[in-house]
Each structure stands twice: as structure tokens, then as C-alpha cells.
């Protein structure tokens, strides 16, 4: 791997103000001096106890002799808030006639919690790329490029567009990578999306075979702009990522499985869903897995784990012509996982004719998602054909199995295989599932919910009625999508969206986990993953009736608001017993993704 790093931090020059951690200063006495080029941009970041804005600062451009050339107001952004402190960035550009910039404060006492960080962005060596065009010469074995960038202008919640053009040794321009986009006016480009509240983002793309040179140019068609701060070039064997190599590799493994789904790529940073989790476990069991998601890989590795190959959706049809000719492998399984579309029907038919076993796996009621404006690709005719033509049908809930049985016209007997949880999370939360701990948590009496908050399925009315009926109970909510018009009572605390890896930190003190979904066709077939997470964290669950809730030894299903309130009250007041803990552990042992993979392979007789 070759790495070129352009990020640098400015050292304090003689006489420049250096703030001490926690120091309270009067902004009118604050002066920072920076020597900078005319095309440079500088960003100063610090933490403050009181918010400062553009009106609190002045920027003066000075000539070599110290004469003031111009005075302007710098850009000031509150990037994030941490521990009641605002992380503030102050941003300014160079001036063609000035050699020094003086950043001055106006009257306002502020406590700076250091250290202050100064970042330079420029076209010159030693600074991140900012200007018109940059040329990068690539090693012969370049496989992928990773860009890290700072969004330096415009709305920092929106992506910045950067043009990429690849050239071979004969200076012939190559087709752009599949992770990018092509516009007749803008040409080929990538979108660098901010991944945090401080305006930083990264993206990874594949390098077209034969690339020797890359040109990078920011697109000025919108307000958002990015400065590329680092570029990593990964040496990757294109052969190992080819379908031919993957098929040859599969001949020495247990068999080959295609998962055709709407799942995001593994390694994309998005929370994994059932097709991702099952792919990992099939690979662990010795199978070679080809995973085709809904769109493009967008920089995710083609070989994220041993035994798994990922491909873009637009590559599938080319691959299909090779897959139907595969020989020398006895066990070949095609899984369409909740992607009832004409293309899936055709793929299933061609592979079935070529001797592949076929499975239609239903993990959601896509017809109902389509009805509320989601899953626009859904085709009811395609779903009927998949239910009738597949060798086997599995679903995640009894309600979905009943629907699939009707659609199959008696040709299939669907098998229910619920969702699950990774063994890692069960073991990670082991300390939360002992009698002393769950009793301590019960006395704290916190009722939590984890998940999306869209009114399409979250029952806000019932939830808020329950919170009002239990004013002494603390309710906590984690997840995205809270409607702006929803007003929360004092005992309900919205914690926002959190990373998967951080969830246990926030939920470890919960007593009860809620699943307050609306009673509607959309939720009738749902088998919520959060049920298994609640169990791993040692929670009792109070849920609307759905999925496999009644199979869980620590869960109660409700039908009315009164039943929900009563179930919460009982869960908070009833002491835990060791037999309840034991039953919970047994339930979790039989609810892992590895167990679900074994169950599925048994159904399809592989």
C-alpha cells in the first residue's frame, strides 16, 4: 500500500498567542498571526465554553511592512458539541497582496479549552489539495483509491463533487470507476459525503485496470467544496476479484451461493442486515458467496472477507452468463432475498434451468413498503412468480409465511426462519445478563427504544400515552427520524442516533425495551432485530404483536395502549428469577446468525 499524506498542523510562530487549556480570555485582546500564500485556506479549530460567531471576530490582511490592506469577517462554524463545549472552526483564505493575516477578537470573554488546531489547505507541497487540478501518477498494481477530505465551503451536511479522470500509458482516457457518476456536462465525478459533524468525509473507489495517471479537479457547479487531505493507493490483485478466480476458488470449498438482495455492501459503514449477516455465516461454513446488492459498491471492498465476493448491480447480468455455465461444483444455490423484481425472476429461471437450487427468502412485506412510497422497484407479479417458481421459500415471520403460501398457489410450503443476532454481541453483553445486574437495572426503571422513528410504523400516539401514564418512569429513545412536530414530555429523553458499536454504552442501564409499532399491514410481517439485541442486553421486552415475539421468554405482546402500560408496569415491578435468566440464555443460544444459516441450508437440502 502506498500512502501520500498531505495533512499538516501549523506551528506557532514567535509572538503568536498560545492559549492554555481552560484559559478565559477577552477576545478583544486575542491576536493570531499567520503567514500564508495567496491561494491558501486556513482553518483554526478550538473548543469554547460559549459560542462565538462571525460578529465576535475580525480578519485583517497585512502587507510585509504591517500595513493593513483589508479587513473582513471570517467564516465561523460550530462543528459539534461535546461535554457542553462547542467545537468551533474559524476559516479564512489568503489575499493576493497580503503576506500575513491577523485574526483579532472583539469584546467577549470566552474560556478556550485547548489545544487549538490549525490546518492549512493549499495547492503547494505540504498542504492538502485545494486548487484547480492535481495529477497523481499511480503504481502499476493500483487496485483502489481512498480519499479523505474536509468540506471547506457550503452546507457541510451535503456532499462535495470532485472530478476524476483516469489515463493509461498511451494517454488514452479510461472509462470511469463504477462507484462514480457520469454527467454529460460535468463528466465523471465522485461525491465526497461528510461522515461526521465536523465536516470530514472519505470515499473509496476502484482503479480502472491499466490506469497510469489520475487527474483530480473540484467541481464548481455548487456551493459545497472539499479539500482532499490524504490519498491512499491500495495495491490489489484484480485477478482475485474476478468472477473466474472466485469460481475456481469455490471448487475447493463446500459450494457456491449467490445472494441477490437490496442489502448495502459489507464494509460500507452502514449497519448490516440479514443478507449481509447470512453471507458471513455461509462463508464461515465453507461456502463461496457472491453478494449482489441493490446498487454500487461505492468503494467497499470486492473481497471484504474470505470466501465472499461483492459486485455492483450492473455487473450481475454479465456474471450471470458465466454462472449458468459453472461446472465441477455440486452445491449451487441462488437466493433472492426480498428483491421481488422482474430481474430476479429472470435470474432465478436461468439459474434453475442450469441446475442451481433456488430459494426465495422473504424478510419484509415489500408490497406494504411499496404502498407507503418505499421499494419502488417492487412488482407483485414478480413476487407471485418467485413464490411459485422457487424450489424453496423461507420467511422471517408466521404472517409472511401465510402470505407466501397463498401466493405460491400450494406449490410451496414456506418455512419460518426468524432474524437473529451475532454471537459476538451475545458474548459482549454477557455481564448484563446475571441476576444481580438485572435486578440493579430494574430498580433504576429506565424504559428504552432503539430504532427508526418514522411515523410510517412507529406508534407515536401509543408511546406518548404510555409515557404520560407513567410520569415517574424515565423513557429513552435512540434512533434517527424523529418528526420535528413531536413534542416529548419531561420524562422522555431523545438521545439521537448512535453508532452500532456504541449502543451498549447507552442501553446498559435500561430495564425494558419497547417495540411500539403500529398495528398495520406494514408491521404485521416484521421480525424486529431489536428483540434479540434487547435480550442480549438483559432486558424484558414489551412489543406490539408481530414476528416471533411470543417465542421469546422475556417478551410480552400488547394489543391496546392499556395493555402496553400494564406490561411496562409489570416488567418494572416484578423481580427477576434465575430461571428467567437461564431461559433467556437458552433462547439467545438458538437465535444466532450461524444457527439461521444452518437452518436455511437444511431447508434447501445443501
Image (cartoon, grey):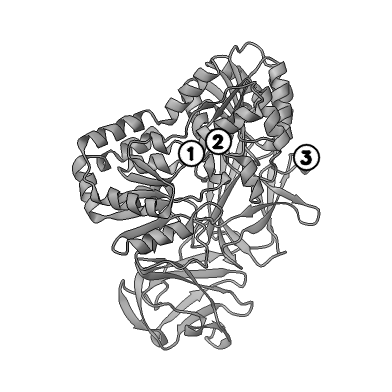
Label 3 crowding class (10 Å Cα cut-off): few <14, some 14-19, many 20+? Answer: few
Label 3 vs label 1: CA separation? 56 Å
For the C terminus, the quadrant is top right
Q: Which residue is labeled 1 in the image? A: 527
Disc 3 to disc 1: CB gap under 8 Å: no
Q: Quadrant of residue 474?
A: bottom left
Label 2 vs label 3: CA separation? 50 Å
Nearest to the eye among marks 3 and 1: give it: 1
> Could you tell me if residue 241 is visible in this image?
no
Q: At numbered mark 1, what does the secondary structure look like: helix, strand or loop?
A: loop
Instruction: Give the image location of residue 477, x and y in percent.
Output: 41, 57
Q: Which mark is first along the chain, 3 or 2?
A: 3
Taking the spot 71% from the left edge, 27% from the top edge, the residue there is 347
Label 1 crowding class (10 Å Cα cut-off): few <14, some 14-19, many 20+? Answer: many
Q: Which residue is labeled 3 in the image? A: 170
Q: At numbered mark 2, what does the secondary structure look like: helix, strand or loop?
A: loop
Residue 138, compared with residue 187, is above or below; it is above
Instruction: Give the image location of residue 587, x and y in percent.
Output: 34, 31
Disc 2 to disc 3: CB gap under 8 Å: no
Q: Which residue is labeled 2 in the image? A: 363
Disc 1 to disc 2: CB gap under 8 Å: yes
Q: Quadrant of residue 139?
A: top right
Amino acid at each position: 500500500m502506498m500512502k501520500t499524506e498531505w495533512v499538516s498542523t501549523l506551528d506557532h510562530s514567535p509572538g503568536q498567542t498560545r492559549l492554555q487549556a481552560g484559559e478565559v480570555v477577552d477576545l478583544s485582546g486575542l491576536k493570531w498571526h499567520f503567514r500564508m500564500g495567496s491561494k491558501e485556506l486556513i482553518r483554526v479549530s478550538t473548543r469554547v465554553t460559549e459560542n462565538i460567531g462571525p460578529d465576535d471576530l475580525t480578519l485583517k490582511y497585512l502587507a510585509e511592512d504591517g500595513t493593513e490592506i483589508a479587513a473582513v469577517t471570517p467564516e465561523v462554524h460550530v462543528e459539534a458539541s461535546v461535554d457542553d463545549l462547542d467545537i468551533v472552526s474559524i476559516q479564512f483564505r489568503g489575499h493576493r497582496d497580503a503576506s500575513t493575516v491577523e485574526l483579532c477578537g472583539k469584546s467577549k470573554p470566552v474560556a478556550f479549552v485547548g489545544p487549538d488546531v490549525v490546518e492549512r489547505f493549499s495547492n503547494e507541497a505540504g498542504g492538502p489539495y485545494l486548487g484547480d487540478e492535481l495529477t497523481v501518477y499511480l503504481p502499476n498494481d493500483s487496485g483502489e483509491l481512498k480519499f479523505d477530505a474536509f468540506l471547506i465551503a457550503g452546507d457541510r451536511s451535503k456532499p462535495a463533487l470532485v472530478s476524476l479522470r483516469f489515463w493509461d500509458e498511451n494517454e488514452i482516457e479510461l472509462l470511469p470507476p463504477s462507484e462514480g457518476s457520469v454527467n454529460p456536462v460535468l463528466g465523471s465525478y465522485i461525491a465526497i459525503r461528510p461522515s461526521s459533524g465536523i465536516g470530514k468525509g472519505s470515499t473509496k473507489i476502484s482503479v480502472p485496470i491499466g490506469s497510469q495517471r489520475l487527474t483530480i479537479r473540484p467541481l464548481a457547479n455548487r456551493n459545497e467544496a472539499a479539500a482532499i487531505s490524504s490519498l491512499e493507493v491500495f495495491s490489489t490483485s484484480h485477478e482475485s476479484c474476478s468472477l473466474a478466480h472466485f469460481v475456481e476458488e469455490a471448487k475447493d470449498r463446500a459450494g457456491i451461493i449467490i445472494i441477490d438482495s437490496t442489502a448495502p455492501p459489507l464494509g460500507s459503514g452502514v449497519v448490516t442486515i440479514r443478507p449481509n449477516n447470512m453471507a458471513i455465516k455461509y462463508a464461515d461454513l465453507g461456502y463461496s458467496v457472491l453478494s449482489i446488492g441493490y446498487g454500487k459498491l461505492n468503494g467497499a471492498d470486492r473481497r471484504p472477507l474470505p470466501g465472499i465476493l461483492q459486485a455492483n448491480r450492473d455487473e450481475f447480468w454479465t456474471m450471470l452468463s458465466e454462472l449458468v455455465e459453472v461446472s465441477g461444483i455440486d452445491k449451487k444455490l441462488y437466493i433472492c432475498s426480498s428483491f421481488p423484481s422482474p430481474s430476479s425472476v429472470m435470474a432465478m429461471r436461468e439459474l434453475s434451468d442450469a441446475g442451481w437450487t433456488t430459494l426465495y427468502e422473504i424478510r419484509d412485506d415489500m408490497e406494504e413498503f411499496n404502498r407507503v412510497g418505499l421499494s419502488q422497484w417492487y412488482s407483485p407479479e414478480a413476487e407471485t412468480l418467485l413464490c411459485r417458481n422457487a424450489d424453496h421459500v423461507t420467511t422471517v415471520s408466521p404472517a409472511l409465511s401465510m402470505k407466501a403460501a397463498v401466493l405460491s398457489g400450494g406449490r410451496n410450503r414456506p418455512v419460518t426462519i426468524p432474524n437473529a443476532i451475532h454471537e459476538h454481541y451475545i458474548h459482549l453483553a454477557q455481564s448484563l445478563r446475571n441476576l444481580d445486574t438485572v435486578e440493579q437495572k430494574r430498580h433504576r426503571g429506565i424504559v428504552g427504544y432503539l430504532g427508526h422513528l418514522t411515523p410510517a410504523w412507529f406508534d407515536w400516539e401509543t408511546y406518548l400515552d404510555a409515557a404520560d401514564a407513567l410520569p415517574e418512569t424515565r423513557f429513552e429513545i435512540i434512533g434517527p427520524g424523529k418528526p420535528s412536530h413531536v413534542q416529548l414530555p419531561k420524562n422522555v429523553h431523545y438521545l439521537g442516533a448512535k453508532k452500532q458499536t456504541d449502543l451498549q454504552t447507552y442501553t446498559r442501564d435500561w430495564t425494558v425495551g419497547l417495540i411500539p409499532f403500529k398495528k398495520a399491514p406494514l408491521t404485521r410481517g416484521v421480525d424486529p432485530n431489536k428483540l434479540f439485541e434487547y435480550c442480549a442486553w438483559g432486558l424484558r421486552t414489551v412489543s406490539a404483536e408481530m414476528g416471533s415475539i411470543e417465542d421469546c421468554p422475556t417478551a410480552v405482546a400488547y394489543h391496546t395502549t392499556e395493555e402496553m402500560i400494564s406490561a411496562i408496569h409489570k416488567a418494572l415491578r416484578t423481580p427477576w428469577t434465575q430461571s428467567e435468566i437461564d431461559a433467556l440464555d437458552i433462547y439467545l443460544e438458538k437465535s444466532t446468525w450461524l444457527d439461521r444459516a444452518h437452518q436455511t441450508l437444511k431447508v434447501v437440502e445443501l
